[in-house]
Amino acid sequence: METIREIQAYAYVVATVFLVVMMYSYLYHLYKAEKKGTRNYEQYGDLALHDNIDDTPIETRTPSNKEKE
């Protein structure tokens, strides 16, 4: 019974460290995309305020290969 608790404790620590690393890597990705100019996340902050059907879209859609055919 004691070994199961030790395994659970180690698994908890490993899972916590993994999730922290994933969170910081995702935040770094968002920061880098904002700096390069590929995404403007400031536009998405206003999305809840401007959600009427006649509002302008945030991003223009480009048709994919399947839609072209």
Image (cartoon, rainbow, N blue to C red):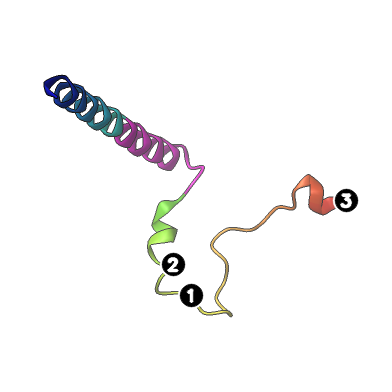
Give, as a three-letter code, the residue at label 3: Glu
Q: Which label is found at residue 51? A: 1
Number of residues whose C-alpha sits closer than 10 Å to that of mark 1, classed few (under 14), some (14–19) or many (20 or more) = few
Verify whether residue 60 appears in magenta: no
Magenta stretch mostly in which secondary structure?
A: helix
Look at 79% across and 45% down and name the residue there: 65
User: On the rendered structure, is 7 left or right of 40?
Assistant: left
Residue extending farthest right? 69
Look at 27% across and 30% down and name the residue there: 15
Q: Which residues are magenta?
A: 22-39
User: On the rendered structure, is 20 left or right of 38?
Assistant: left
- Reply above or below: 35 against 68: above
Pointers 1 and 2 in contact (C-beta within 8 Å): yes
**Of residues 16 and 56, the one drawn nearer to the viewer in this rendering:** 16
Pointers 2 and 3 in contact (C-beta within 8 Å): no
Name the spot of residue 58 as percent of width and height, x first.
54, 62
Q: Which label is found at residue 47? A: 2
Q: Which residue is mark 3?
A: 69
Look at 33% across and 38% down and name the residue there: 27
Number of residues whose C-alpha sits closer than 10 Å to that of mark 3, classed few (under 14), some (14–19) or many (20 or more) = few
**Residues under labels 3 and 1: Cα distance?**
31 Å
For label 3, the SS is loop
Give, as a three-letter code, the residue at label 1: Asp
N-terminal-most mark, 2 or 3:
2
Name the spot of residue 62 as percent of width and height, x first.
70, 52
For label 1, the SS is loop
